[in-house]
């Protein structure tokens, strides 16, 4: 069954026809060529496909494109402005908090979701926010540190107040 | 990749039931989809029609007022419960249990209704709903009915829901006494895991202590025999006796996550700990007040 | 004059910006117009004869472009032993083996077509039990083993399931045991585990009108892949091209040639159309390389004073259906079987055994992780039984300058003693002796454990590297290598080395993505060998390029070459530093004052092959230099044991490695951090579980758990020792795999110190620990 859907993706209005069974992940990757969200397991266990839907992190492999109709979707490609990285991205770069990078877009979006809701999370809250994002390379500690540093500096830089 | 199906959105309760009846065994209700899509991805379940219930009036959201029953829309995502201030303060056990499900991403989609309708013996919210003595408000071909949570589950993946019937709301009776609840879950990892054993324990100021177990029987179970020991005494001996009775009532299986014997041992250990922590928590409330 | 502008500097990774923005493309992100999608039909039997395959219905399905089976590509292939075909031929040998492949216009159609393929099987008795598999008269997984092509370093036993028998015979084993005051003997086991990179295997294949096969693959080994394909297809190498985008984690699982081969016959049938295959997570768990299981018996003779006199080590590897790569795992475990100790008399037998299980292959630190699980617990146990502190017993037996290892190689300045002492210091080691005892009512107990390790690159003696350096018009630099960036930071470190040697800015170096048609040759990105081996090639290439720039500059400035230097992309006269121009002046040659040209574009070339490695004696495994180098390390852990549930939490880890020379302290530390957590995960959680029919029961993250962010130690202390590697770049040697080797035995040793129990089979699950605790309590009551 075909559905006409309209959603905002990274600030731009997108209108498309999709089949019922098309997952949001496939829609982003195959239709919009937004390949930042990755498929790691297809079952919502690894978090590599994490994007924000109405500001909340979700596994885009467990959501239909048609379910995102009328919603606001933010992917890793929608972060930062021009050449300027989002503070989370910059902190991950500065902290060497990535290796193979395959889980990184998902982790960035989980962190973004957290900091949008909570500009000053505790370490436990950061761990909670990313424990649905499996990473086989880094051992996580630097990732947690990188997110903590953003939140620590967010008060002065007024990051995370964009919505 | 998912196999082709048709997605339809139910606008009203009646709409949902009609669509479901029309679809027959080819239809499945869709709420958060975090379990449904996994089974479809694995080709264990091949519905031809998915009926999205999320836009039905009242199926998402939490109605809560002091002195009234707590009413939770079945399609409310678990994080809505976790973050709800009223639930956190008055039904803290439910917040704990909801919080222990999957990952944050999953909890943003997974609904409380889905958690119980999938009827996994390890469903995290089920033991909690058992000790809160929740009622399940459904809507179906025979209109609305209210089912006690204790009668809801009939086996792994099985409930009393009939063809075309779905859960609309979950009602938790109003609090008429102070209480303190503890949810203990033993998994393999420290987060994002299914239970090997889980225990919900609710200590009430009335003196009653309610206990329910997950992942140790074909359904989540309330262990009233164990509870009864604690009616008259709450000393260490009674707690140990209650824990031992809980173990006797558990009928776990060996599966890939743990062996039957280990589950039995952990049922006893964790029941004892849950009781102790719940009683201590209740006592602390008393002291504060 | 050797500059050190970029040595020991934690520069920002050169792949970070691309990866953090989602711009980095991995093989599965690539898309081509008209691309087809592949799906494989896989066996539902562990061992069966294929009686008949009927693909007609699949072929007739609209949208299907090709269907292939084993007969379409029956040539055997493999890295060390040619025992494998992309699709099962005549027989399936494990549950999951590819039987047929489909290429179709969509994945949906491909899957439906695969479902329509009819296969009739005649079941054969599966060989699933290692002990049964080695018995005389056992059902053979490969009856034709003796006809297979195999590398000279491997020793199959015809008419058995043993595809390699590696032997060490050092000193006089009988005399050694006769001299011993005490003999300790124990069995240990490691289960099958999975690499579990977050990116599943993905590849795209295209067979074009020029008869050229091009494969884009998530691969650690583009050149080895080209080599294996060229041999098995009979194609000249200039008709096989492998392109390697970023790899989303490898850990050995993406070495050699693997699922990519299944695309080849499909591509040959769909000429000029690219076909994409992306493994599902289930396939990733089961149908790519796995780490093979290993059962071993370790026997050690020791004097009262703690000195080892003899060691006998028997290892049986549950190597799976094909052992093309697995044979080298068993070899590596054999030649490293002394661990970090000096043992005068040794007998080691390492057997690679075919079973009807998924295909065993290389996994980070292969051979060594498994044998150290046994050796490092064994010595700890011996220490307790002798009443000697485990660190002290290690000190007594450690390899030192002039010691020999299992192969009889005389070692020069092994860094293990410094590593051990530093790890003990960082964890706050206090002498212990005897098992821990848990008092009544105690619910949580903490204890420390330690383990050592050593590992050599497990690779052919002639595994070589090369590098090409090209200066662009503007003075930016291209580095062409065949070493892959898997996340370990190789592109960063190699760019640092180049910047350092050539004198250019690190930011101006761009490492080119790998393409076997254009990139400089590299054997494989495995064995922790890239910094060491490719690093040397980069130094050589940079020196070559630098020499050309200096020549150009000498002409330009009219001074001797010796009076020119380059720093931060500026070329200047040393005796008159005011005379200074940007390096771009010389990129394409130089224009002299009379406007005539000189030189030409700067292109530097460099190669490296480790020299002097000789074959081990086939009977005794002895060799003066059997491997390129040895890296040593030690890890100490502090754990908390929940006595009620058996759950272990690792609170603190101290990890110290002899890196020879740390080129980038940040990427080096991140390797250790990730490796330690992977080690904890393997130690506590990971195990592939099989049904009695050989079906993998947990091919998903639901029931194959790996550590999450909530499962890491509170504190992780990383330090390095720097005993230079003679032939390493600036003295560096590899550490990438080593860092997860000692973690599980260190935890096991801490568990013994905590509670007096040993779990000799990985993983140390709560359930296993709980029953061991229970057993100890009841034993103490008896």
Image (cartoon, coloured by chain):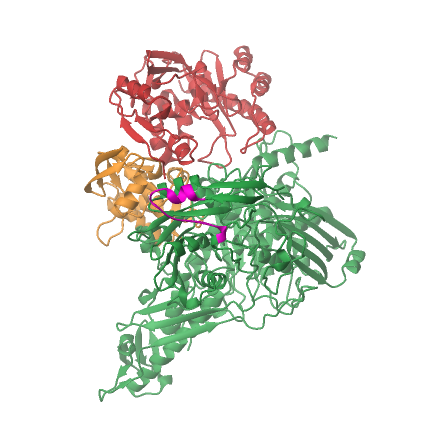
Q: Is residue C56 magenta?
A: yes
Can residue A119 be seen here? no
Q: From the viewer's perspective, tell me whether residue C260 is left or right of residue A113.
A: right
Chain C rendering hue: green
Q: Quadrant of residue B101?
A: top left
Q: Which residues are magenta?
A: C55-71
Q: How many numbered callouts?
A: 0
Q: Quadrant of residue A44?
A: top left
Image quarter hosting the N terminus of chain C: bottom left
Q: From the viewer's perspective, tell me whether residue B64 is left or right of residue C662.
A: left
Q: Position of residue C225 (x, y in %)?
A: 46, 60
Q: Is residue C618 magenta?
A: no
Q: Is residue B23 above or below residue C419?
A: above
Q: Is residue B161 above or below residue C520?
A: above
Can residue C354 be seen here? yes
Chain A rendering hue: orange
Image quarter hosting the C terminus of chain C: top right
Q: Position of residue A135 (x, y in %)?
A: 42, 46
Q: Nearer the viewer, residue C11 or C283?
A: C283
Residue in the picture at 61% in, 66% down: C626
Q: Position of residue C175 (x, y in %)?
A: 80, 60
Q: Nearer the viewer, residue C158 or B56?
A: C158
Q: Position of residue B214 (x, y in %)?
A: 49, 24
Q: Quadrant of residue C155?
A: bottom right
Q: Going by the picture, which residue comes out furthest to the right? A: C178
Chain B rendering hue: red
């Amino acid at each position: 069954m075909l559905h006409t859907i309209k959603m905002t993706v990274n600030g731009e209005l997108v209108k498309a026809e999709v089949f019922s069974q098309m997952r949001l992940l496939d829609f982003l990757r195959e239709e919009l060529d937004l390949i930042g969200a990755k498929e790691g397991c297809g079952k919502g266990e690894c978090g590599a496909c994490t994007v924000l839907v109405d500001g909340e992190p979700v596994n885009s492999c467990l959501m239909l494109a048609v379910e995102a109709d009328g919603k606001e979707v933010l992917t890793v490609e929608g972060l930062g402005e021009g050449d300027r990285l989002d503070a989370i991205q910059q902190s991950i770069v500065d902290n060497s908090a990535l290796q193979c990078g395959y889980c990184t877009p998902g982790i960035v979006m989980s962190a973004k979701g957290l900091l949008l809701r909570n500009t000053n999370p505790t370490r436990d809250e950061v761990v909670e926010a990313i424990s649905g994002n499996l990473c086989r390379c880094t051992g996580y500690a630097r990732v947690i540190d990188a997110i903590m540093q953003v939140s620590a500096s967010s008060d002065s830089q007024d990051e995370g107040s964009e919505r | 990749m998912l196999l082709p199906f048709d997605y339809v959105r139910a606008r009203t309760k009646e709409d949902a039931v009609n669509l479901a009846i029309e679809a027959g065994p080819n239809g499945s209700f869709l709420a958060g989809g975090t379990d449904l899509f996994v089974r479809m991805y694995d080709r264990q379940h091949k519905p031809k029609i998915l009926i999205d219930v999320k836009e039905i009036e009242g199926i998402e959201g939490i109605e809560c007022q002091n002195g009234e029953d707590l009413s939770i829309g079945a399609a409310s995502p678990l994080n809505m419960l976790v973050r709800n201030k009223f639930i956190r303060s008055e039904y803290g056990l439910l917040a704990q249990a909801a919080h222990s499900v999957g990952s944050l991403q999953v909890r943003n989609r997974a609904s409380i209704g889905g958690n119980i309708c999938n009827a996994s013996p390890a469903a995290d919210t089920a033991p909690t709903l058992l000790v809160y003595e929740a009622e399940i408000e459904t809507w179906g071909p025979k209109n609305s009915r209210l089912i006690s949570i204790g009668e809801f589950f009939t086996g792994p993946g099985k409930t009393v829901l009939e063809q075309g019937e779905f859960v609309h709301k979950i009602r938790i009776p109003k609090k008429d006494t102070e209480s303190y609840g503890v949810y203990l879950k033993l998994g393999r990892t420290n987060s994002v895991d299914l239970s090997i054993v889980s225990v919900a324990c609710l200590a009430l100021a009335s003196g009653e202590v309610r206990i329910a177990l997950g992942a140790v029987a074909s359904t989540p179970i309330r262990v009233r025999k164990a509870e009864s020991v604690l009616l008259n005494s709450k000393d260490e001996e009674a707690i140990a006796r209650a824990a031992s009775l809980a173990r006797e009532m558990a009928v776990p299986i060996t599966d890939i996550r743990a062996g039957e014997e280990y589950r039995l041992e952990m049922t006893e250990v964790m029941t004892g700990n849950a009781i102790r922590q719940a009683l201590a928590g209740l006592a602390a409330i008393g002291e504060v007040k | 004059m050797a500059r050190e502008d970029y040595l020991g500097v934690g520069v920002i990774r050169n792949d970070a910006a691309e990866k953090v923005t989602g711009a980095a493309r991995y093989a599965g992100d690539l898309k081509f117009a008209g691309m087809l999608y592949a799906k494989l039909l896989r066996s539902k039997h562990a061992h069966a004869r294929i009686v008949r395959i009927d693909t007609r219905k699949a072929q007739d399905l609209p949208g299907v472009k090709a269907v292939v089976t084993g007969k379409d590509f029956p040539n055997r292939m493999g890295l060390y032993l040619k025992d494998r075909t992309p699709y099962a031929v005549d027989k399936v040998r494990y549950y999951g083996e590819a039987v047929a492949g489909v290429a179709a216009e969509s994945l949906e159609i491909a899957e439906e077509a695969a479902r329509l393929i009819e296969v009739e099987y005649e079941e054969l008795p599966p060989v699933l039990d290692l002990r049964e598999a080695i018995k005389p008269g056992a059902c053979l997984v490969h009856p034709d083993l003796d006809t297979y092509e195999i590398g000279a370093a491997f020793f199959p036993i015809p008419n058995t399931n043993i595809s390699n028998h590696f032997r060490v015979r050092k000193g006089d084993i009988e005399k050694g045991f006769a001299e011993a005051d005490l003999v300790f003997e124990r069995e240990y086991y490691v289960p099958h585990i999975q690499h579990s990179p977050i990116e599943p295997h993905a590849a795209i294949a295209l067979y074009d009108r020029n008869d050229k096969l091009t494969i884009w693959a998530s691969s650690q080994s583009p050149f080895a892949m080209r080599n294996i394909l060229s041999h098995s297809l009979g194609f000249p190498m200039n008709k096989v091209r492998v392109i390697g985008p970023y790899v989303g984690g490898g850990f050995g699982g993406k070495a050699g040639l693997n699922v990519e081969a299944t695309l080849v016959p499909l591509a040959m049938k769909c000429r000029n159309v690219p076909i994409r295959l992306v493994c599902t997570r289930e396939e990733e768990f089961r149908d790519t390389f796995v780490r093979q299981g290993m059962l071993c018996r370790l026997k050690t003779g020791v004097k009262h004073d703690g000195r080892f006199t003899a060691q006998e080590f028997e290892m049986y590897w549950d190597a799976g259906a094909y052992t093309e790569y697995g044979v080298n795992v068993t070899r590596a475990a054999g030649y490293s079987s002394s661990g970090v100790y000096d043992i005068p008399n040794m007998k080691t037998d390492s057997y690679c055994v075919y079973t009807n299980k998924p295909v065993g292959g290389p996994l980070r630190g292969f051979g060594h992780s498994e044998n150290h699980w046994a050796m490092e617990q064994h010595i700890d146990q011996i220490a307790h039984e002798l009443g000697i502190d485990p660190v002290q017993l290690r000190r007594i037996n450690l390899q030192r300058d002039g010691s020999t290892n299992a192969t009889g190689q005389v070692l020069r300045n092994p860094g293990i003693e410094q590593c051990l002492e530093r790890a003990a210091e960082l964890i706050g080691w206090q002498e212990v002796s005897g098992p821990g005892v848990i008092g009544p009512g105690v619910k949580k107990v903490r204890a420390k454990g330690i383990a050592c390790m050593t590992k050599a690159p497990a690779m052919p003696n002639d595994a070589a590297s090369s590098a090409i350096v090209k200066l662009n018009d503007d003075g930016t630099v291209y580095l062409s290598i065949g070493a892959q960036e898997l996340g370990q930071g190789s592109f960063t470190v190699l760019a640092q080395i180049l910047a350092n040697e050539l004198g250019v800015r690190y930011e101006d170096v761009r490492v080119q993505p790998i393409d076997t048609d254009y990139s400089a040759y590299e054997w494989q990105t495995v064995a922790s060998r890239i910094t060491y081996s490719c690093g040397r090639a980069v130094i050589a290439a940079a020196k070559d390029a630098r020499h050309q720039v200096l020549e150009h500059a000498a002409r330009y400035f009219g001074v001797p070459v010796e009076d020119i230097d380059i720093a931060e992309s500026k070329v200047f006269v040393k005796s008159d530093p005011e005379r200074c121009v940007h390096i771009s002046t010389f990129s394409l040659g130089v224009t002299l004052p009379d406007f005539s040209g000189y030189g030409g574009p700067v292109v530097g070339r460099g190669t490296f092959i480790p020299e002097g490695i000789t074959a081990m004696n086939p009977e005794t495994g002895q060799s003066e230099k059997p491997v390129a180098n040895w890296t040593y390390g030690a890890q100490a852990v502090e754990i908390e044991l929940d006595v009620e549930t058996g759950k272990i939490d690792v609170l603190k880890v101290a990890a110290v490695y002899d890196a020879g020379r740390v080129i980038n302290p940040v990427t080096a530390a991140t390797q250790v951090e990730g490796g330690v957590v992977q080690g904890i995960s393997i130690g506590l959680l990971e195990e592939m579980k099989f049904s009695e029919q050989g079906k993998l029961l947990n091919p998903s993250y639901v029931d194959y758990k790996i550590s999450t962010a909530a499962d890491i130690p509170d504190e992780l202390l990383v330090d390095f020792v720097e005993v230079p590697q003679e032939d390493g770049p600036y003295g560096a040697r590899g550490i990438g795999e080593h860092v997860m080797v000692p973690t599980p035995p260190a935890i096991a040793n801490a568990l013994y110190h905590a509670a007096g129990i040993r779990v000799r089979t990985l993983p140390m699950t709560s359930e296993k620990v709980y029953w061991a605790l229970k057993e100890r309590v009841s034993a103490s009551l008896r």
